[in-house]
């Protein structure tokens, strides 16, 4: 029988100060880890943690154009520098979990994945499953990946967690059931800054129109990237929640089934669709 697993992404903009290089929001990170610890103790559920890179790996990744591969004379050292920045934040997050008596261990995609043209061609998930089986708490995140065609590339935390969710569908022991994105905002916001409560393929066009005027909207990344990746997972039967990590106990409530603020993305049509449409007017 497959054991259910919840995947939790701690957004880089939540746990770091993106305006100051390599500065962690220690109090926020500590509180979110404490909420996860309380929920884990209460429910006994299995979690996999992913974290964004925030003010850590994004700066060198942009400097060295790491996403595009070996396109510069210093691309090789750039790959190493960017990967090191990502690993530094991973160890900080792991240490915070350890300080709260949770058995966290690093699970770095840079050591388990090979891509070609940015898409996976080889991945080893045995270690991840053994970690889960032994009661450990894997901590992963966006990472720099060796690529057979272009030298290297970057996989976002959304893509990393999505890949794990997909691969666990083939596991005899574990099955991903939900992904939670912990962000700075209380969910997916419409043009009037109201939270869109639910998203599916049935109302995607309306959602895109509703958020197209919001500050920072970008169909190639950001919130839209989260929505697109979440809809891919919805096809596998996974539910995604996009919630605020700045609201105390919001993550805890989401994990234990109590009322919380956020947006749910799923494959099913929204029952109260007409009520939702009123948010768009």
Image: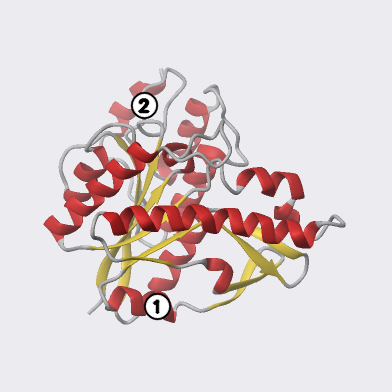
- What is the C-alpha distance between the residues marked 1 and 2? 37 Å
The tally of labels here is: 2
Residue plotted at (22% across, 49% down):
255
Q: Quadrant of the C terminus?
A: top left
**Residue 53 x, y percent position in the rendering:** 53, 48
Mark 1: give few (<14), some (14-19) or many (20+) Cα within 10 Å: few
The answer to whether 265 is drawn above or below residue 133 in the figure is above
- Residue behind mark 1: 170
- Residue behind mark 2: 277
Position of 260 with respect to 13 (left or right) is left
Q: Mark 1 or 2 closer to N-term?
A: 1
**Residue 140 x, y percent position in the rendering:** 45, 61
Residue plotted at (30% across, 70% down):
136
**Quadrant assignment, res 219:** top right
Residue plotted at (40% across, 44% down):
200
| Secondary element at image label 2 | helix
């Amino acid at each position: 029988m497959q054991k259910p697993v919840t995947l939790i992404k701690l957004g880089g903009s939540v746990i770091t100060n993106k305006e100051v290089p390599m500065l962690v929001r220690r109090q926020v990170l500590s509180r979110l880890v404490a909420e996860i610890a309380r929920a884990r103790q209460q429910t006994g559920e299995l979690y996999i943690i992913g974290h964004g890179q925030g003010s850590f790996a994004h700066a060198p990744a942009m400097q060295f154009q790491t996403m595009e591969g070996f396109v510069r004379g210093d691309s090789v050292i750039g790959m190493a520098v960017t990967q090191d920045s990502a690993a530094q934040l991973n160890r900080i997050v792991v240490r915070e979990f350890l300080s709260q008596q949770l058995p966290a261990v690093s699970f770095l995609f840079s050591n388990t994945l090979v891509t070609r043209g940015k898409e996976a061609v080889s991945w080893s998930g045995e270690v991840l499953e053994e970690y889960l089986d032994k009661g450990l708490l894997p901590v992963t995140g966006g990472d720099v990946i060796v690529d057979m065609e272009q030298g290297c590339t970057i996989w976002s935390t959304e893509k990393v967690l999505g890949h794990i969710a997909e691969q666990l569908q083939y596991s005899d022991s574990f099955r991903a059931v939900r992904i939670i994105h912990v962000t700075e905002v209380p969910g997916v916001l419409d043009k009037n800054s109201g939270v869109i409560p639910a998203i599916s393929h049935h109302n995607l066009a309306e959602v895109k129109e509703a958020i197209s005027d919001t500050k920072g909207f970008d169909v190639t990344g950001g919130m839209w990237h989260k929505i697109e990746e979440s809809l891919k997972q919805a096809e596998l039967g996974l539910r995604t929640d996009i919630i605020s990590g700045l609201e105390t106990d919001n993550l805890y409530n989401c994990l234990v089934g109590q009322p919380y603020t956020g947006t749910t993305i799923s494959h099913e049509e929204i029952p109260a669709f007409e009520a939702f449409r009123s948010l768009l007017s």
